[in-house]
Image: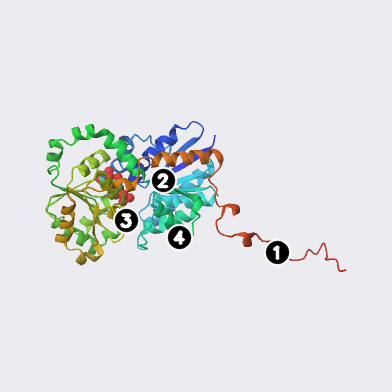
Amino acid sequence: MKKLAFVLGIRPDVIRAALIIEKLRRYDDMEFVFIWSGQHYSDNLKDVFFRELDVAPAQIDLGARGDTDAEVVASVIARLGPVLGELRPEATVFLGDTNTTTGAIASAQLNIPIVHIEGCMRSYDWRMPEEKYRVTIDHLSDVIYAYYPEYKEQGIREGLNPDSIVVVTNPIVDILQRFYFERREKFTRLAGDAFFAARGIERGRYYLMTCHRRENLERDSLDAIMRLVASAPYPVFFPASYRVQKLLVERGQQLPVNVRAVDPIGYDEFLALMANARGVMTDSGTVVEETCVLQIPSLQMRHSTERPQVYDVGSSVKFDPSEADRYPAEVVFGKLEALHGTSWDASVLGDGRASERIADDLHRRTADGGFARHRPELYHVPVARSYRDDGLPNPARPAVTP
Ligand code: UDP
């Protein structure tokens, strides 16, 4: 039976891919092999999402580890290579812009076609490691699923083959539809008064915060974020990544008194907190998409974005920690508060059918061999010169002179 390998490795991967995986697992004419890189491995960054989003665990866990990005990347490539060599899938599918996506190099080394979900996103901010990963995997890929036509255009401008980029819209819309909007009663029960009391906050009168992007962990940027947070007009509930917690301790940096920090939390709890927040302060790409769909104002603590659509529709306020002077707290929170009670058109993000489109296309290509797209005849640029003959006379057949 033809096989498709699907490689993921961090918390938001499980969230975004949950319904794609669900659908791929249902096809009985292909074998779906789910591989976990091991980048995230604790219960609250991994297993809780498998449970809450009904995703059956990966068949293979590479257990890739490392103290530095270089070590993690090396470990992903070194461990994925032999697994793919054994499996020989029709293609290897990756999602997003993480260390795990560098596993595409292992697939490339084996000449196994590569698929990239969430392709052609660009911040054009070359300081971000994610941007380099996006460019690398897109150019290695045979098939790219891009969320919006403008992303496809970005890819084409970089020289990617238009015929290899499929526009599908954003699967986060499907996820919120299934796991939030269709389960509203569950969230009404979960987010009762006791839920907020236990967290020391009041419904609708707190900001939810996440902050873990590498550029924001530089001392100056983190300081700027903490100064901003200290001026927030409402208490701030902050599920803090372990890296941020460690950094704050190492630097002896205190959290402002209006911040309540906890360890990272599961998806149901986070959804309940997002949906009932006055606003969400974040540097996460997924969270600003979610708040846009949930009609909750967000404040993005980032210099650049690869998701400008959430600004286009008027759902999000910018704060740039690297140029904090240009974004005074009273202006930033003034804008955020002005968004409270307004609504916007989130339909630009998707129609709830992205996961289905991706899964169907993957299924079709697995069956008909439609993955390998680096064949000379499929290039959209002229490649004939590379395959030209040498043009030299054949000495075995000397030219006949009349
Ligand atoms: N999230 C969560 N618990 C948390 C923080 C975030 O469930 O404590 C969810 C959030 O709703 C979003 C995803 O995790 O779906 C975002 O993860 P992250 O910020 O790590 O990824 P990024 O968006 O930066 O790629």
Q: Which residue occupies the foreground of this view, 164 or 366? A: 164
Q: CA distance from mark 3 to mark 4?
A: 18 Å
Residue 353 location (% of width, % of height): 38, 40
Q: Amino acid at mark 4?
A: Arg
Q: Residue at x 25, y 44 (%)?
A: 294
Q: Earlier in the sequence, mark 3 or mark 4?
A: 4
Q: Amino acid at mark 3?
A: Pro
Callout 3 touching callout 4 (CB < 8 Å): no
Q: Which residue occupies the foreground of this view, 121 or 15? A: 121
Q: Which residue is mark 1?
A: 390
Marking on residue 308:
3
Kindly state the secondary structure of the residue where label 2 is placed: loop
Callout 4 touching callout 1 (CB < 8 Å): no
Q: Amino acid at mark 1?
A: Asp
Residue 145 location (% of width, % of height): 44, 48
Of the two numbered discs 1 and 3 in the rendering, the one whose residue sits closer to the viewer? 3
Above or below for 160 versus 15? below
Q: Which residue is mark 2?
A: 168
Q: CA distance from mark 2 to mark 1?
A: 44 Å
Callout 2 touching callout 4 (CB < 8 Å): no
Q: Earlier in the sequence, mark 2 or mark 4?
A: 4
Q: Earlier in the sequence, mark 4 or mark 1?
A: 4
Q: Is residue 229 left or right of residue 382?
A: left
Above or below for 264 versus 157? above
Q: CA distance from mark 2 to mark 3?
A: 17 Å
Callout 2 touching callout 1 (CB < 8 Å): no
Q: Earlier in the sequence, mark 2 or mark 3?
A: 2
Q: Which residue is mark 4?
A: 157
Above or below for 139 versus 6? below
Q: Earlier in the sequence, mark 2 or mark 1?
A: 2
The response on whether ligand 1 sits within 8 Å of label 1 is no
Marking on residue 89:
none
